[in-house]
């Protein structure tokens, strides 16, 4: 028996929603509506200088040549698809990773927790209805030249999330910009900054292809 999701997708592709105008119905048949994102952009917040340049450099130096890198997965972290997500990852908060250089790496994690806490509190000051229960683990991401992450959202059935948080560890690379709302809004946050935004379906985003150098970032999510 077809699922509700499949039925809805098929219906939207084949017929208009009742009550729509002919112009809107034609657009629906052609594909998803492209909406003006200006009213959503304020919810994408960039805070600069939340991490020091020295801290960013030290974190990169600790892991840049590590043998701990793995292919980043998609969805509920069970599948690798380099056509969708061409990125390498280290699970920074894993005990096995921390123990390999405990004093230094636990120090990194504590600094990230402190910076993340302050950033989230600032975000909640802007948007008081952003109610967070807890944070998740930190992941270190590496985008070599040619790396990218196609358009996606960060919250889904098996991994529900409320707020996404990404720290920029460097900016000495080409390409690799953030692109929100299917290309309607792009960002290039400077080194040491953090990008925060809702994880829901209303905030589709991607990391555009890195054209030169290597892009490093730390990501985490709040639920």
Image (spheres, helix red, strand yellow):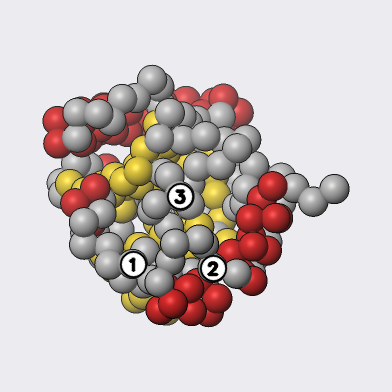
Q: Is residue 106 left or right of residue 56?
A: right
Residues 214 and 184: in front is: 184
Q: Position of residue 209 (x, y in %)?
A: 45, 73
Which class describes the residues within 10 Å of circle 3: few (<14), some (14-19), or many (20+)?
Answer: few
Tell me the tag on residue 16.
Answer: 2
CA distance separating discs 3 and 1: 14 Å
Check residue 201 in the rendering and tell me which mark sits there, or answer none: 3
Residue 194 disc label: none
Could you tell me which secondary element the residue under label 2 belongs to? loop
SS state under label 3 = loop
Task: Tell me where residue 13 appears, x and y as whole percent.
Answer: 61, 70
Above or below, 22 against 69 in this view is below
From mark 1 to mark 2, how far is it between C-alphas? Answer: 17 Å
- In the picture, the disc for residue 35 is 1
Please name which of the two marks, 1 or 2, marks the residue nearer to the observer: 2
- Residue found 55% across the figure and 76% down from its top: 29
Q: Residue furthest right?
A: 1
x, y percent for residue 73: 63, 51
The reply to whether dot 2 and dot 3 touch (C-beta < 8 Å) is no
Identify which residue is drawn at 44% across, 62% down.
19
Nearest to viewer (mark 3 / mark 1): 1
Name the spot of residue 207 as percent of width and height, x first.
42, 64
Using the numbered discs, state the Cα–Cα distance from disc 2 to disc 3 in whole angstroms.
22 Å
In front: mark 2 or mark 3?
A: 2
Contact, mark 1 vs mark 2 (Cβ under 8 Å): no
Please tell me whether mark 1 sits on a helix, a strand or a loop: loop
Q: Which circle's residue, 1 or 2, is located before the other in the chain?
A: 2
- Position above or below: 11 against 104: below
Q: Is residue 194 left or right of residue 133?
A: left
């Amino acid at each position: 028996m077809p699922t509700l999701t499949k039925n809805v997708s098929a219906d939207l592709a084949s017929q208009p929603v009742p009550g729509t105008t002919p112009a809107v119905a034609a657009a629906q048949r052609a594909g998803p509506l492209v909406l003006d994102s200006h009213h959503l952009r304020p919810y994408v917040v960039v805070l600069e200088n939340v991490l020091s340049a020295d801290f960013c450099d030290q974190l990169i130096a600790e892991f840049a040549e590590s043998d701990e890198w793995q292919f980043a997965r998609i969805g509920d972290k069970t599948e690798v698809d380099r056509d969708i997500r061409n990125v390498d990852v280290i699970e920074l908060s894993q005990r096995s990773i921390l123990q390999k250089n405990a004093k230094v790496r636990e120090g990194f994690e504590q600094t990230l927790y402190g910076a993340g806490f302050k950033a989230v509190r600032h975000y909640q000051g802007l948007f008081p209805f952003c109610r967070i229960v807890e944070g998740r683990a930190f992941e270190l991401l590496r985008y070599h030249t040619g790396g990218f992450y196609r358009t996606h959202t960060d919250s889904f059935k098996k991994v529900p999330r409320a707020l996404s948080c990404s720290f920029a560890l460097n900016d000495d690379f080409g390409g690799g910009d953030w692109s929100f709302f299917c290309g309607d809004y792009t960002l290039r946050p400077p080194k040491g900054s953090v990008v925060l935004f809702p994880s829901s379906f209303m905030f589709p985003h991607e990391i555009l292809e890195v054209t030169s150098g290597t892009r490093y970032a730390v990501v985490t999510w709040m639920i």
